[in-house]
Image: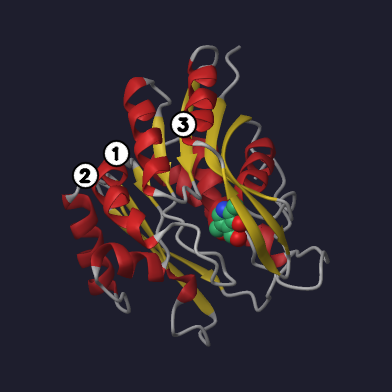
Amino acid sequence: MFTPQALSIAGSDSGGGAGIQADLKTFQMRRVFGTSVITAVTAQNTLGIGTTLMLPVDTVRAQLDALAADFHIKAFKTGMLGTADMIEGIVEKIHEHDFGTFVLDPVMAAKDGTPLLQKNALAAFKSHLLPLANVLTPNLPETYVLTGINVRTDHDAAEAAERLQAQGVQTVLIKGGHSENSGSLICKDWVFTPENRFVLESPRTLTRHTHGTGCTLSACITAELAKGASIEHAIRTAKALLSAAISSPLNIGNGQGPLNHWAMRMEN
Ligand code: PXL
């Protein structure tokens, strides 16, 4: 039997809650074999990010070549990419190899504000990477940077998605968790696929242990797509995993702690 294989191209979080570590844990939870190409190493705990080291672009490209030569990766995601050079080096390899369906998590900054994508890398991000995305998963601040639209209403979300789809993105998932309406008990996400659109609503859990939510969501979507699920099914499964992972928190570290990646049972 063919074993589904997925890839995460992202940064390492020594604290284990976000980045490559969150992605691999999520792949494993969904019974997908996880591979990883590390773009950067962050010295990090639940209190924040210290030193960050970008790996040489050639080392990243060599990791991609190694996987392409031996694996059958059906879906991949990108997280922290850091610089314009890194984006350009990876984009070339995405064109050269076939890693399957592409889930683009437009990681720009950590929750403590540390930039994870240089400002001068935005142009390369928008012109070279964005048009390749099968699924794009921006939060509200990222949606603003990519479209100039400050999403507050369903209409704003539709307009932002339209702009992104005009640039080649297939499915847009706008995550409403950063809403100014965060006093609300409901958290709303908007999904626009090429065929339809729908809204996902979930109860807002009052917790500060939300480190790695974006990474985990996009990793779960990637895992489900690697197994051949439809986009809609993959997104709904990822939301269910996220809700479980947020609502049964772990007690790790003294700051903004990680999700509970093993909270969702496989039969869900
Ligand atoms: O959650 C975004 C993110 C992605 N990748 C790495 C991170 C973070 C947030 O801290 O550290 C490596």
Above or below residue 23? Residue 137 is below
**In the image, ligand 1 is in what quadrant?**
bottom right
Q: Distance between the residues labelled 2 and 1?
A: 7 Å
Instruction: Tell me the kind of residue under disc 3.
Output: Ala
Count neighbours of disc 1 (C-alpha within 10 A) and say few if under 14, some if 14 to 19, many if 20 or more: many
Residue found 32% across the figure and 49% down from its top: 125
In this rendered view, identify the residue nearer to me: 140 or 265. 140
| Upstream in sequence: badge 3 or badge 1 | 3
Q: Quadrant of residue 52?
A: bottom right
| Upstream in sequence: badge 3 or badge 2 | 3
Q: How far apart are marks 3 and 2 (CA)?
A: 18 Å
Q: Determine whether, in the image, residue 239 is placed left or right of residue 176.
A: right
Q: Quadrant of residue 181?
A: bottom left
Residue 75: mark: 3
Residue 3, percent across and down? Answer: 60, 19
Q: Mark 2 points at which residue?
A: 168
Residue found 54% across the figure and 18% down from its top: 66
| Upstream in sequence: badge 2 or badge 1 | 1
Residue 132: mark: 1
